[in-house]
Image (cartoon, helix red, strand yellow):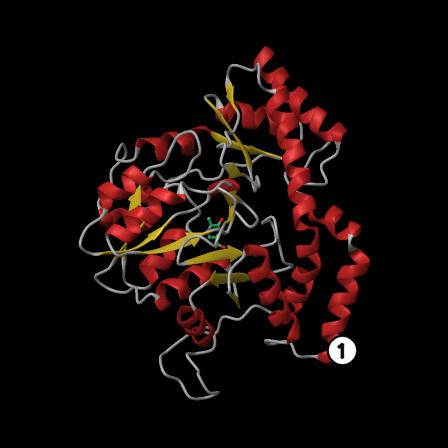
Amino acid sequence: MEVPLLDLRRQYQAIKAEIDSAIAGCLEHTRFILGPEVETFERNIAAYCGTSFAVGVASGTDALLLSLRAFDVGPGDEVITSSFSFFASAGVITRLGAKPVFVDIDPDTFNLLPSEVERAITAKTKVIMPVHLYGQMVEMDEILELAKKHDMKVVEDAAQAIGAKYKGKKAGSIGDCGCFSFFPSKNLGAYGDGGMVVSNDEKFASRVRRLRVHGFGKRNFSSEVGYNSRLDTLQAAILNVKLKHLDSWTEARRERVHIYSEALKDCAQVKTPLERNHNYHIFHQYTLRVEDRQRLMQFLKEKKVGVATYYPLPLHLQECYQDLGYKPGDLPNSEQASEEVVSLPAFPELTEAEQDYVVEAIRQFYRK
Ligand SMILES: *Cc1c(COP(=O)(O)O)cnc(C)c1O
C-alpha cells in the first residue's frame, strides 16, 4: 500500500461537476480580475467567520502584508510573533522594514504563549501576530488583554485555521483582523494561490481594498503606493464551491484524528496532539511529537507513508535573521518542537484501510 500525506485529486473527483461548472462560468463571462465570484466569496467568508468585512487578496502572505501595512507598520516598529511558524509570518514584517520579535511556544499546543508575548513587549511594539498553528487557536483572551493594555493591534495569522473556534468564536474574527490562505494544501484550498483578510473595522477593510489595487481610490488615482494583489476570479469561483463542503471535511478530519489518537494512546514514545477544552481544532495538520523522528520518518517513507516536518527550523534561527542576534537555546520550546514534530496523513478522503496501515506501521516501528 502507498498512503500519500495529501491527495487533492480525490477531493476534486468528488466535486468535479460543481467545480467544472464554476470554472466554465468564469470562462464565459471573462471578468477574470475582481469578477462577481470574488465579491460573492468575500460575502460568504465574512458570513462564515462572523465578521462584517472580507477582502480577497492574492495569497495568505499578502493578506498578512497588506494588513500590517494598513495598520501603518513600518521602519522602527516591532511585531511580536511565534518563532514556530511558516516563514511568511516573519517575512512580511521584515518586508515592511519593521522588526520581527520572536517568542516561544507552549509545548502542548505549539502556539505562542501569551506570557512570552508580555515579556517581549517594548515601547516599539505595534502589532501582535498570533499564529493559530496546525488549526488550533492561540489563547486569545490573554492576547487581547495585552493588546488593549499596551495599545497594540492584533493580526491573526489564521492561514491554517479557517473554521477553528476559540470559546465559540471563529478564527480571524477575534483580533483587529484575521488572515487566511487558500494555498492548495490548506483546509480550504484553491487551485493556485489566494488569500483573504477579514475584519469588523470598515476603515481598515477599505484601506486593504485600496492597497490590493495600487492604492487606487478611484481608478488610476492613487492616494498611497499599494500592490497588485487580488484574489483571482477563477479561484474565488472554485472556493465558493469548496466552502460549502468545508465543515463536513473538517468533521472527517476530526474523525481520522480521533482514530489516530485512540490507536496511538498506549504508544509511550509518541505524544499525540492536545485539543484544549475551549477550542475547536480543525487539524490542518495532525502532528505527533516523537524523540526518534529521523528514524521513524525514514521507516514510514520505506513503508510508502507520506509524512512531513512542519517546521524543521524555527524562525529565530533562520539564516536570513542572523542579524537579529538570536542564538540556539534562546527559544527552547520552539527548537525542541522543530526536532520532534512529524505530521501524518489525515485528509478527509483518507480511507479506513489506509489509516489502519499507517497506524500499524507506527506500531511496528516501536515494537522493533
Ligand atoms: C500558508 C501559510 C501562510 C502563507 O500563505 P500563502 O497563501 O502560502 O502565502 C502564512 N502563515 C501560515 C501560518 C501559513 O501556514
Callout 1: SS: helix
Instruction: List x then y, in percent, for residue 331.
Output: 29, 35
Instruction: List x then y, in percent, for residue 197.
Output: 48, 62
Q: Residue at x 57, y 18 (%)?
A: 265
Instruction: List x then y, in percent, for residue 269.
Output: 50, 17
Crowd tier of the residue under label 1, counting other residues whose Cα lies within 10 Å: few below 14, some 14–19, many 20 or above? few
Q: Residue at x 73, y 67 (%)?
A: 23
Asked whether 239 or 361 is in front, the reply is: 239
Using the image, determine if residue 25 lies above or below residue 159.
below
Question: Which residue extends farthest right?
Answer: 17
Question: Which residue extends farthest front?
Answer: 168
> Is residue 221 found left or right of 13 in the rendered image?
left
Instruction: List x then y, in percent, for residue 246.
Output: 66, 50
Q: Quadrant of the C terminus?
A: top right
Using the image, determine if residue 26 lies above or below residue 180.
below
Amino acid type at mark 1: Glu
Q: Residue at x 52, y 62 (%)?
A: 196
Is the residue at mark 1 in contact range of ligand 1, meaning its CB lies under 8 Å from it? Answer: no
Q: Quadrant of the N terminus?
A: top right
Q: Residue at x 38, y 44 (%)?
A: 141
Using the image, determine if residue 143 lies above or below residue 273.
below
Residue for badge 1: 28
Judge whether residue 357 can be spotted in this image: yes
